[in-house]
Amino acid sequence: MNHPVRILSLGPGDPELVTLKTLRQLQESDLIYVPATRQPATGRLLSRAASILAALDIPGERIRPFELPMERGREQAREAYRKLSRVVREEQSAGRRVAVVAEGDAGLYASVHYVGDLLCEAGAEVAYTPGIPAFIASAAAAGLHLVKGGESLLVLPSVATAAELLASAGEHTTVVMKLSQSREAVREAVARGGEFEWRYFENVGTDRQFVTDSPGEILRREFPYFSLLVVRRPSSGAFSE
């Protein structure tokens, strides 16, 4: 009997924000594949997802890190996912219960969805389990009411220019998810956008969580991979706490 491959969403980083359904499916899985990145200084693989699973008491022998290159060009990452999909398909065909995890929600800017697509093309059954996106957890951490009434929310993976971000913030509450890909454009927008309210979040849901609404402090941050920004005009009162 072939079990469906589970694509499981782990949420933003706090193990307690993993849903009960995801936890149950993790506990039922024979093999769990987690993304990992190699650290240039040490050569070691680092995986936030593996740390979450360890905190949930998932046995380490079930966890299988797969190296995911993080360079801006995505072809190497796609090749890593193609390789992973072949391995997962073989394990599923052997009757094992296999899961692949995504941080945040697997349906929101999660490249692990590429694995699901490849598996479906190969005829495998795939099932997705949702999770809490990082920007939702960030709003809760700061006590923000992101949108209300007739307001709109725009979520961007990155921005090309400061003008693009400022124009968006004039119309919507705007979330920029991958700040490490937009450092200069975001810094310019923060420096120019004194009429807006800015909220910066870093490593939300972990012991390294950092939140600030100070434009000066935002400009001093390095914008690591796990960082995001929420910006809009203050007249709506959406940032009332």
Image (cartoon, rainbow, N blue to C red):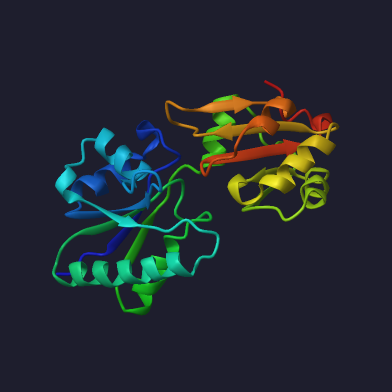
User: Hey, which quadrant is residue 124 in on the image?
Assistant: bottom left
Q: What is the x, y in percent for residue 76?
A: 44, 67
The residue nearer to you, when weighing 37 against 65, is 37
Image quadrant where one finds the N terminus: bottom left
Q: Is residue 173 left or right of residue 12?
A: right
The residue nearer to you, when weighing 146 against 138, is 138
User: Hey, which quadrant is residue 128 in on the image?
Assistant: bottom left
Identity of the residue drawn at 34% across and 72% down? 119
Q: What is the x, y in percent for residue 175?
A: 66, 44
Q: What is the x, y in percent for residue 136?
A: 55, 38
Q: Is residue 139 left or right of residue 160?
A: left
Give the answer, above or below, for where 166 lies relative to 92: above
Give the answer, above or below, for where 83 lies relative to 221: below
Residue 227 can be seen in this image: yes
Q: What is the x, y in percent for residue 173?
A: 73, 41
Residue at the limit of the structure toward the front, as seen here: 41
Identity of the residue drawn at 50% across and 28% down? 209
Residue at the limit of the structure toward the top, as seen here: 241
Residue 177 can be seen in this image: no
Q: Is residue 95 left or right of residue 232?
A: left
Identity of the residue drawn at 72% across and 37% down? 231
Identity of the residue drawn at 83% across and 43% down? 170
Q: Is residue 214 left or right of residue 35?
A: right
Image quadrant where one finds the C terminus: top right
